[in-house]
Amino acid sequence: MYQTENESISYLKDNATIELFFLNAKSCIYKELIEVDSEVVFELASYILQTTPSQLNDVTRSDLKKLPALPTQALKEHPSLAYCEDRVIEHYKKLNGQSRGQAIVNYMSIVESLPTYGVHYYTVKDKQGIPWWLGLSYKGIFQYDYQDKVKPRKVQLPSALY
């Protein structure tokens, strides 16, 4: 997905299009294609939970287990699955009364602010055979260390490409 500088989910009018962006972002985060800090993952998971028809009780915990909301990396960073679920439920309690549509828009607002959202990564090697990530987005072309897709080593802005 390529965006121009001023594009955001908030400018879209068609509900089906917004839903598709949401489903794609949710999938990318779950598959760890977009890097997200675990605390942000917990907040995002609470919005996913808000988009499902559930009540705040034990059903919520079982619903959470069925949803593709917590990436493996976030689970590995914390002592237990129960801890992660508790963090999600803490965020979920704050969303009381929020509509499904508002939860999707809020979810996407957070996702759009992530530095790795909208960047397409390609594995490349330099002349010495050292692997790097090459990131392409509407913001430019970026070269990343192979262990860090968040902070680019080199940046080539679109204005410099013309």
Image (cartoon, helix red, strand yellow):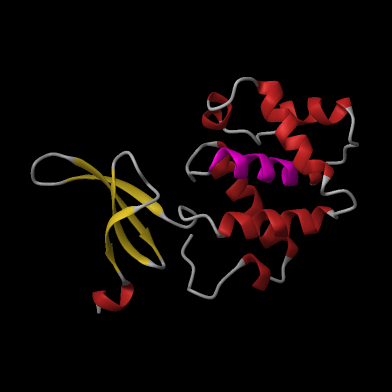
The residue depicted at 46 percent of the width and 52 percent of the height is 116
Q: In the image, is residue 93 part of the stretch drawn in magenta?
A: no
Locate residue 55 relative to residue 82 in the image: left or right: right
- How far from the left and from the top, in percent, is residue 69? 66, 36
Which image quarter is the C terminus in? bottom left
Locate residue 110 relative to residue 58 in the image: left or right: left
Locate residue 84 relative to residue 145 in the image: left or right: right
Q: Which secondary structure class fits the magenta region best?
A: helix
Locate residue 104 relative to residue 27 in the image: left or right: right
- How far from the left and from the top, in percent, is residue 126? 14, 46
The residue depicted at 40 percent of the width and 50 percent of the height is 150
- How far from the left and from the top, in percent, is residue 58? 87, 25
Q: Quadrant of residue 137?
A: bottom left
Q: Quadrant of residue 26?
A: top right
Between 107 and 19, the one lying in front of the other is 107
Between 90 and 142, the one lying in front of the other is 90
Between 25 and 98, the one lying in front of the other is 98
From the viewer's perspective, is residue 8 above or below residue 123?
below
Q: Exactly how many numbered labels are in the figure?
A: 0
The residue depicted at 54 percent of the width and 42 percent of the height is 37
Q: Residue furthest left?
A: 128
- How far from the left and from the top, in percent, is residue 101? 79, 57
From the viewer's perspective, is residue 100 above or below residue 32?
below
Q: Over which residues does the magenta segment extend? A: 37-49
Q: Residue furthest top?
A: 80
